[in-house]
Image: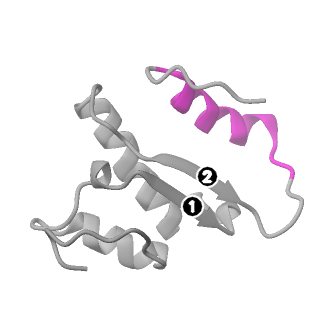
Amino acid sequence: MVKGDKYSVFVITPAIIDKYLEKEDGASISEFSLMVFDECHHARGNEPYNKVLQHYWRSSRSKPNAALPQVRGFPASAYVMTTASSGDWMELLQGERGWSFM
């Protein structure tokens, strides 16, 4: 990825996008309009997906009016989260952004 260039679609691993967001001259999470996570059940702990979501969370806290990307996640198969684990992310996203879940 080259800063300043404009692309319509990136197909990239979460580890690479995390490293790019960490770079001092890298992208800001707000430069993206949509992020689609395949295998999103890996968004926990110290996994790369979770690190990317932490960039999102920090941007939402430090710049409440910033245009942040929509996030869509697809697990590998039918996946059931416990109320405790899913509730944490739902509360975070519902907070200041006013998102709702079906």
Q: Nearer the viewer, residue 78 or 44?
A: 78
- Seen in the image, is 29 located left or right of residue 95? left
| Other residues around mark 1 within 10 Å, as few (<14) / some (14–19) / many (≥20) | few
* Number of marks: 2
The residue shown at (30%, 74%) is 19
Extreme-left residue of the structure: 25
What separation in Å lies between label 1 and label 2 (alpha carbons)?
Answer: 5 Å
* Magenta residues (range): 80-95
Query: Relative to 15, is 81 above or below?
Result: above
Is residue 84 magenta-colored? Answer: yes
Give the image location of residue 34, x and y in percent: 47, 54
- Counting residues from the N terminus, which is met first, the one under dot 1 or under dot 2? 1
Looking at the rendered structure, the kind of residue marked 2 is Arg
Is residue 67 magenta-colored? Answer: no
- The secondary structure that dominates the magenta segment is helix
The residue shown at (23%, 33%) is 62
Looking at the rendered structure, the kind of residue marked 1 is Val
| Other residues around mark 2 within 10 Å, as few (<14) / some (14–19) / many (≥20) | few
Quadrant of res 102: top right
The residue shown at (54%, 49%) is 71
Query: Relative to 98, is 24 above or below?
Result: below
The residue shown at (36%, 68%) is 18
Location of the N terminus by quadrant is bottom left
Q: Which residue is mark 2?
A: 72
Q: Which residue is mark 1?
A: 36
Any mark on residue 18, and which? none
Q: Nearer the viewer, residue 44 or 25?
A: 25
Give the image location of residue 52, x and y in percent: 42, 59
